[in-house]
Amino acid sequence: MLGSTNIVAFVPTKDAGKARAFYEGVLGLRFVKDDGFAMVLDANGIMVRVARVPQFTPAQFTILGWEVADIGKMVVGLQEKGVHCEKFGFFEQDELGIWTAPTGDKVAWFKDPDGNVLSISQHVA
């Protein structure tokens, strides 16, 4: 039923100004509008609503991610914009913070200004 409709992603924020600077200025999402409840951004045709919330505790898992063609190049590009990948102690990651799954898929994680965990991933065919 919903498999043929567009998905809308939601991300919480306590500081819409910092969130906009990050999602638009650093990650390159296109600002669409601010409806007073959420900042609406376009991520390659997917609506991302960065919702204002008074308080929340960031989840300790990925809440939003992007599939990329060259994860190493993307991590370096993010680093040049001041974004640093998270390094976890429970599995092996390379010097850039990229983890390679047994399947060959690769994932790197980073946080937005509110501490939300985001990811980029490169998948094998």
Image (tube, rainbow, N blue to C red):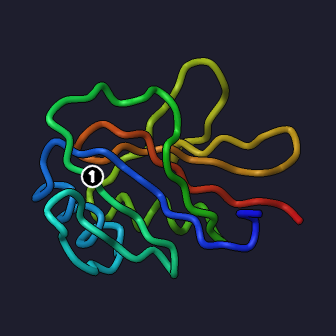
Q: Amino acid at mark 1?
A: Ala
Q: Nearer the viewer, residue 28 or 71?
A: 28
Q: Identify the image quadrant of residue 98.
A: top right
- Percent of width and height locating residue 49: 35, 61
Q: Secondary structure at mark 1?
A: strand
- Residue drawn at point x = 70 percent, y = 50 percent: 106
Whether residue 106 is situated above or below residue 30 in the rendered picture: above
Q: Nearer the viewer, residue 119 or 14?
A: 14
- Percent of width and height locating residue 40: 30, 70
Residue highlighted by disc 1: 51
Near mark 1 (Cα within 10 A), the count class, few <14, some 14-19 or many ≥20, is many
Whether residue 24 is situated above or below residue 65 in the rendered picture: below
Quadrant where the image shows the C terminus: bottom right
- Residue drawn at point x = 54 percent, y = 54 percent: 65
Q: Identify the image quadrant of residue 72.
A: bottom right
How many numbered marks, from 0 up?
1
- Left or right: where does residue 103 sit relative to residue 85? right
- Residue drawn at point x = 24 percent, y = 65 percent: 39
Q: Nearer the viewer, residue 23 or 45?
A: 45
Q: Identify the image quadrant of residue 101.
A: top right
Quadrant where the image shows the N terminus: bottom right
Residue situated furthest front in the rendering: 1
- Left or right: where does residue 87 sit relative to residue 72? left
- Residue drawn at point x = 10 percent, y = 59 percent: 17
- Percent of width and height locating residue 95: 54, 42
- Percent of width and height locating residue 63: 49, 43
